[in-house]
Amino acid sequence: MAYTNSSMVSYTGLSPNHSGQRTHSIDRITPHCVVGQLSARTICDCFPAGREASCNYGIGTDGAVSLCVEEKNQSWCSSSNVNDQRAVTIECASDMTEPYAMNAAVYSTLIKLCTDICKRNGKSKLLWFGDKDTTLNYSPRSDEMVLTVHRWFANKSCPGNWLYARLDDLAAKVTVALGGSGSQTSGLQASVFAGLSEADVIAKVGPLFTADQKKNGILASVSLAQFILESDYGKSELAQNANNCFGMKKSLSGNTWGGSSQDGNSIYTKQTKEQNADGSYTTIMADFRKYPCVEKSIADHSAYLLGAKNGTSLRYDGLKGCTDYRKAAQLIKDGGYATSLTYVDKLCEIIQRWNLTQYDAANVTDTEVWYRVRKNWAEAATQKGAFHDLTNAKNCADANAGYSVFDESGNCIYTGKQSSALPYLVRVPIADLNIRKGPGTNYAKTGKYTGVGTFTIVEEADGQGASRWGLLKSYATERNGWISLDYAAKV
């Protein structure tokens, strides 16, 4: 990909503090507070040689923009190599004390600069999820840019509470400027489950339930078992058409609970069966909640379990913090969540069958990494699952032809045994894809580009700077013409 810098820049003061060209495409923006009402030029002056810090752009107190590290290069800004590798970082002039407020000129320019960054990198929407685990476990689509913050990676307030409280507004205004609606409708769609095996569905959503438990205190294994039982692995009519994965009706417990992630208006009407006390069933028509994505369904489910009341008492009192999955399931049943007489046994059987306790927060530490199984790192939509156990990730890759295992930095660490047959054709949509003398950015460029067109790949290899490298047929004899397959699509 050919990287460019913003035309909004009025001052360039390049810092030597960076890690060279990115090895991951840009899909994040991380705004910071510089802690001072500084000019755009002074922000660049903050990063001289010898100081292990820098940023891509600075926004001065008058709204002017400076370039400190070219957009193609990884800055040192957010205390996370993984984040800086894929994020454009922006230091913004601010007050020197919490909430580190920014003036109208700075905020207005931030909106325009984020819009410009998105446009030049082929993004049509900017997303803000407001939650660390949800964001870092999310794989953006090719047209999505995601906001992250420094405080998630270090013991800092950055970007300050003033800007943090406005990131939802920032994302909405940028998305509108890009031609979108400004509503946060992105996220995992249940429709992707239709073509997945039961095991692949669990691997894909498991990390979402771990993140939810860390936030809300409800055992991930129990919520995940409910997801499986209520939505038939995300393949039920209600899940497929409304992203409703828990059978939640429009009206629940008189809606006497707060924190709902549902808009209160979107519904899906369908037939459903209710079990009577004598075991018989009655078929009724009912209105169910409709969600923009699976993550919203999970969040609403937890908010309901924690906040629903029966009179003045919590309907599911004792559920938060419960570490015994059978006891937690019984609390849910006793609170009136389901009418099935065998509901608890069904949940426990699912938990045991799939070893769902592996997703409980107590069994997942923050230091563990996620291994993602995809065709290549850039194609997030092809992801088969995310695993803490590398062996499980490798098994998944072996079972799916053409898939590989990637670490959190996007490096390919294992290629499935059922790799695609060689040779094959690829289509390159860009004119300036470098041809290198070996499989990796550590090999010299040949000085030539593929140009836009269709080419034959005769060999694949792992290497630095891409999830997979391909040898061009015309260079097969000397084996000295390799391209990054991240920027090529099979024909």
Image (spheres, grey):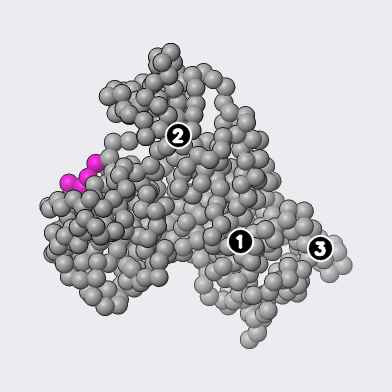
- 323 horizontally vs 244: left or right: right
Q: Quadrant of the N terminus?
A: top left
**Mainly helix, strand or loop, the magenta region?**
loop
Q: Amino acid at mark 3?
A: Asp
Query: Which of 83/439 is in front?
Result: 439
Query: Which of 311/225 is in front?
Result: 225
- 175 horizontally vs 240: left or right: left
Would residue 69 be seen by someone viewing this image from the given angle?
Answer: yes
Q: Which residue is mark 3?
A: 345
Residue at coordinates 43% horizontally, 13% vertically from top-left? Answer: 477
User: Answer yes or no: do the residues labelled 3 and 2 have beta carbons within 8 Å?
Assistant: no
Q: Which of the two marks, 1 or 3, is nearer to us in this view?
A: 1
Residue at coordinates 24% horizontally, 57% vertically from top-left? Answer: 50
- Residue 12: in magenta span: no
- In three-dimensional space, the C-alpha distance between marks 3 and 2, rounded to whole angstroms, equals 49 Å
- In three-dimensional space, the C-alpha distance between marks 1 and 3, rounded to whole angstroms, equals 25 Å
Image vertical order of residue 306 relative to residue 344, above or below: below
Quarter where residue 368 is shown = bottom right
Q: Position of residue 407 (x, y in %)?
A: 51, 46
Q: Position of residue 398 (x, y in %)?
A: 64, 35
Q: Which residue is mark 1?
A: 364
Give the SS element for disc 3.
helix
Q: Magenta region: which residues?
A: 4-8
